[in-house]
Amino acid sequence: MKAIVNQDNCIGCGLCAGDCPEVFELNGDKAQGKEIPAGKEDAAKNTAANCPVQAIEIVEVVK
Ligand code: SF4
């Protein structure tokens, strides 16, 4: 699974990077999502649900 941050919607509040730094990092004034490490799926989904502008999408990556 991978987290994708919609760059148009993200307001750079930093909540996701603070909540779940294994998956999200701030890059300038926008957050970036990464590949979700094993065991961090629920944390990433919770963080996505808490984003104030719903900018985070969790997607399955087909390998
Ligand atoms: S919580 Fe949402 S708005 Fe805030 S930095 Fe993360 S993706 Fe952007």
Image: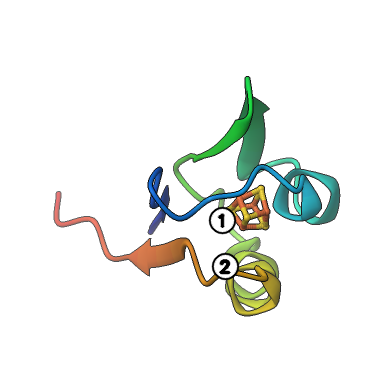
Please determine whether, in this image, residue 42 is positioned above or below residue 38: below
Q: Do the residues labelled 1 and 2 touch (CB within 8 Å)?
A: yes
| Residue under the point 62% across and 64% down | 44
For disc 1, the neighbor class at 10 Å (few under 14, some 14 to 19, many from 20) is few
Answer with left or right where residue 57 lies relative to residue 28.
Answer: left
The image quadrant of residue 24 is: top right
For disc 2, the neighbor class at 10 Å (few under 14, some 14 to 19, many from 20) is some
| Residue under the point 64% across and 63% down | 39
| Residue under the point 57% across and 69% down | 53
The image quadrant of residue 40 is: bottom right
* Badge 1 amino acid: Ala
- Nearer mark to the viewer, of 1 and 2: 2
Q: Does the residue labelled 2 lie within 8 Å of ligand 1?
A: no
Residue 27 x %, y % = 60, 23
Please determine whether, in this image, residue 24 is positioned above or below residue 39: above
Q: What element carries label 1?
A: loop
Residue 26 x %, y % = 66, 30
Q: Mark 2 points at which residue?
A: 41
The image quadrant of residue 29 is: top right
Residue 49 x %, y % = 62, 79
Q: Mark 1 points at which residue?
A: 38
**Viewer-closest of 13 and 44:** 13
Considering the image in quadrants, where does the N terminus appear?
Answer: bottom left
Q: What element carries label 2?
A: helix
* Badge 2 amino acid: Glu
